[in-house]
Amino acid sequence: MMTAVQTEVLTADELARIARDQIDAFNKGDWEQMRALLTSDARYHEFGTERKIEGPDQIIELFKGWKTAFPDAAGTVTNAVADGNTAVLEVTWTGTHNGPLVTAAGTIPASGKRQETPAAVFYVFEGDKIKASRHYFDAMTLLKQIGAQPK
């Protein structure tokens, strides 16, 4: 007799909470908590930089790079919606550019300037883990605020 594997169906509130937990893990630099929220084959697409990352270790390394450039970086969730297996957060990212920011075009040295950048992150879940994330933010706004682009 075969039995079907049942996957737990999470409520919209539970999905939004887990998505918020990832932002909290980033804010605290709690990389183990972040790893625990991801599937083993998680994918991350950062539209502001055009980076596509696969795997929890690589995703965490990318987030550590942001924390190196902006040691006080923090996301504040301003809105959350969820339905089916997807949660979407509106996030305002803040931080002071006190470390090197590595980009595809080269490294931007620390400017000491504060930035505040609005963003949206779409999370797709597999059970209670994040399978894929799509992060939308205006990279030009960020670069202007830290003095890397003319205003």
Image (cartoon, grey):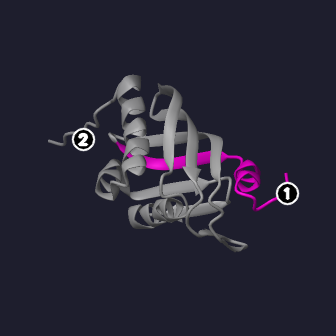
- Which mark identifies residue 150? 1
Residue 6 drawn at (x, y percent)? 25, 36
In depth, the one of 104 and 28 nearer the eye is 28
Say which amino acid is labelled 2: Val
Residue drawn at 48 percent across, 33 percent down = 87
Residue 37 drawn at (x, y percent)? 34, 48
SS at circle 1: loop
Say which amino acid is labelled 1: Pro
**How many numbered discs?**
2
For the view shown, which residue lies furthest in the bottom direction? Answer: 106
* On screen, residue 81 above or below 37: above
- Say whether residue 134 is magenta: yes
Left or right of 59, for residue 149: right
Label 2 sits on residue = 5
* On screen, residue 125 above or below 111: above
Which segment did they paint magenta? 129-151
* On screen, residue 125 above or below 80: below
Count neighbours of disc 1 (C-alpha within 10 A) and say few if under 14, some if 14 to 19, many if 20 or more: few
Residue drawn at 64 percent across, 48 percent down = 115
Count neighbours of disc 2 (C-alpha within 10 A) and say few if under 14, some if 14 to 19, many if 20 or more: few
